[in-house]
Image: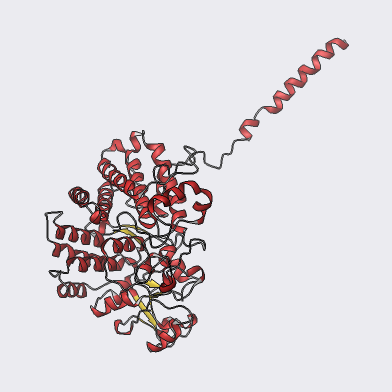
Amino acid sequence: MKKIFKYILPTVLLFSAASCDKGLKELNINRVNPTSVDPAALLNNAVINLSYSTRSVIFDMGIVQQLVSPNGGVLAGANFNQDSRDNGTGGAMWQLYYQNVIKYTHDIIVSTKTVAGRSNLYNMARIIQAFAFMVLTDEYGAIPYTEAGAGYTDLLLFPKYDQQQDIYPKLIQEFTEATAALTTTSAAGTETQDILYAGDIVKWKKFGYSLLLRAGMRLSKVDVAKAQSTVQAAFTGGVITNNADNAYIRHDANFTQPIGNMLNGSEAANFYLVKAFVDTLKSNSDPRLPSIAIRYKGATNGNGQTVAVGTTNPADQIGMPMGYDNGTIGARATADGLASFYDYSQVDRRRMVKTTAPIFLVTAAQTNLLLAEARFRGWIATGTAAQYFADGIKAHMDQMATYDAGSAVAGSARDAYVTLHPLLPGIELQQINTQYWIASFLNGPEAFANFRRTGYPALTPNPYGQPNNPDVPNGTFIRRLTYPTSELSVNTENVNAAIASQGPDKLSTRLWWDK
């Protein structure tokens, strides 16, 4: 009996254990968290994060003299010709795009490359990724490109850098191939969830070819033949020439605009329209000035900037001059007849930079103006430079209503301005690219890139501290942004190799296409 019990007990325990284990695997399955993500959602996440960061206000818009602050600290940048890679603003675009755009587009490209039913999504991701890379290389020069975004898929945690002259041909190839591959055939998939164009392939193709046009024009000083052939291909493909096709990011009360948050929050009283920008609009009786600007007359501090004292009258607008800091701007404001520096004109944060205002990526205004230059150069044979020029100005004036109904430009004022400001012989490039500067207001990276490419508008360099500034010599402009400290400390070998080839990691180092 003892012997029988000896063998029965382990058997009972074994079945008991098996019985207790039954269902444990099911209990350990998390039925709430997703196990996979539709790559279309990743594309939307990437598009949303294309919104320009506050860094574009501090550097890009300051360099091209559209917005400036007399204050330092975390706001120091273009206002003082100061490198601020370590204060959280200098590297913001780098981190935003690599972590929240390129990472997602890379994952989409990997997961959809061989899936026939997601062909359109695959090519949309390629276009968005190439756009992000173009912004990054235009800001910094040499960047991780070939190995970027592959930290998870390929365990490439320390990506090598590609030089800009090697990146641009690949960007042109991506824009060309991906845009051409987009199709309305059902086999390629219909991506109606996309927040940029709701799956409208015709608009996506215009977006892609407009980016191709932009990339081709970047080469105007370094490879004329390649620039011309690229521009011709983009034009033949069909670009954005109507505001209905504009590529822009929409914002609402739940998803607010980054720049709007900044200029309606802690920095509301710290940024002002630059004198050069205001004077250009004011001297030409430009109807966009009252749509953009507001001046709080008599304000002696931020609390004094109230609706009651605000004026949008063009005659009242006074831009802040470059070259002053918190200690010297007061005397200059007094000399300008103002109560304080808080009395200078600002971009209207209740209209153009309200938190629900859109951020434009590529517009009909910009594209028409690029076509005006291309036609003037003889790179395309259709239309006239004068007509593209006029159409670009009209498109931007019409675009103003998208920011806010209170920013709309009347059609009669628009037409009168265009009639009084035709394209004139001998100064075509100056006129076209000065208008591009205006049409790219609040699109800091694009305004900065086109200013370096063309040299227009003809701005006077910011004089602040330049006689003793070895990085931005007297009479010069910032030409690029410096690499964030995170790259210098973590990806040291690769970033140092890039610097050795490109040139010193300084604000004054020119990029490959910026000759």
Residue 110 percent across, percent down from the top left: 41, 38
State which quadrant residue 354 falls in.
Answer: bottom left
The quarter of the image holding the C terminus is bottom left
Front position in the image: 509 or 403: 509
Count of numbered tags = 0
Horizontal arrangement in the rendering, residue 455 relative to residue 487 (left or right): left
Q: Is residue 33 rendered to the left or right of residue 328?
A: right
Tell me the colour scheme of the image.
Answer: secondary structure
Position of 145 relative to 325 (above/below) = above
Front one among 423 and 456: 456
| Residue that sits furthest to the right in the current view | 2
| Quadrant (top left/top right/bottom left/bottom right) for the N terminus | top right
Which residue lies at the image location 73% right of the left edge and 24% below the top edge?
17
Residue 445 in view of the camera: yes
Observer-nearest of 352 and 161 = 161
Kindly tell me whether residue 257 is visible in this rendering: no
- Location of residue 53 by image quarter: bottom left
Residue 498 locus on image (x, y percent): 42, 49
| Place of residue 30 in the rendered image (x, y in percent of width and height, measured from the top left) | 58, 39
Q: Give the left or right position of residue 149, taking residue 275 as reference.
A: right
- Residue 171 image point, x, y percent: 31, 47
